[in-house]
Amino acid sequence: MADSSHMLQWRRWVPVTIVAMGTTLAVTHLLHGGGAQPAQLVLLMLPIFLCAYRGGLVPGLLATLVSVAMSFAVDPAMAELADIVDELALLVVGTMVSMLSEHLLASRGRAEASARRAEASEHRFSESFHHSPLPLALVRLASSRYTEVNAAFVELVGLGPQYQPA
């Protein structure tokens, strides 16, 4: 149940992040009169996406700070409103992408752990079923066919060791 709520949270943040990125690019485009600034902003976002996707929150935030610092290094005299908006937008989008990636990585980790637990449980059941001294059989209700039988069941019914259920 917790995994489904995390998945809903993840699904809610994806559109918010995409809208924030689109809004950032649109505002940057409008403030700079269609110049080359939006392309530079996209290039600054690329390392944020990659670091956040591979490492989660901390690497994404670090890449965000490095991208903002690189932007200031390229143009240290950023005094226009458009430049300040660009940097704030980069910080907001970088933070959102980093948070989203952290949720994604955590959800993936929980799903993998759940799959490992299910596999271990299935293995324990199989071992108990096949090594039980009691005759056991699993029957599909819809077709009334045996899907699995253990050695004690085969011996009780007298089918012989070569019997394999359908």
Image: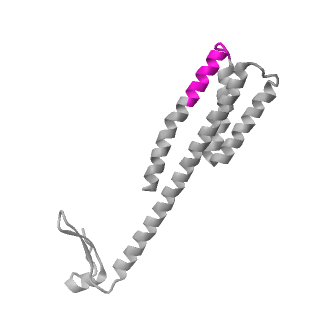
Q: Which residues are magenta?
A: 20-35
Give percent across and percent down for residue 108.
52, 52
Which quadrant of the structure image shows residue 26? top right
Which quadrant of the structure image shows residue 78? top right
Image quadrant for the N terminus? Answer: bottom left
Q: Residue at x 79, y 26 (%)?
A: 74
Q: Residue at x 65, y 22 (%)?
A: 38
> Nearest the camera: 87 or 107?
87
Q: Residue at x 70, y 28 (%)?
A: 87
In this picture, residue 73 sits left or right of residue 142:
right
> Nearest the camera: 98 or 39?
98
Query: Up-down: is 91 above or below 155?
Result: above
Taking the magenta stretch, the answer to whether it contains residue 33 is: yes
Give percent across and percent down for residue 14.
51, 38
In this picture, residue 97 sits left or right of residue 162:
right
Query: Up-down: is 163 above or below 74?
Result: below
Query: Up-down: is 140 above or below 136?
Result: above
Give percent across and percent down for residue 139.
23, 70
Query: Up-down: is 65 above or below 32?
Result: below
Dominant SS of magenta comes to helix
**Which residue reaches farthest top?**
33
Q: Residue at x 68, y 18 (%)?
A: 36
In this picture, residue 117 sits left or right of residue 79:
left
Taking the magenta stretch, the answer to whether it contains residue 49 is: no
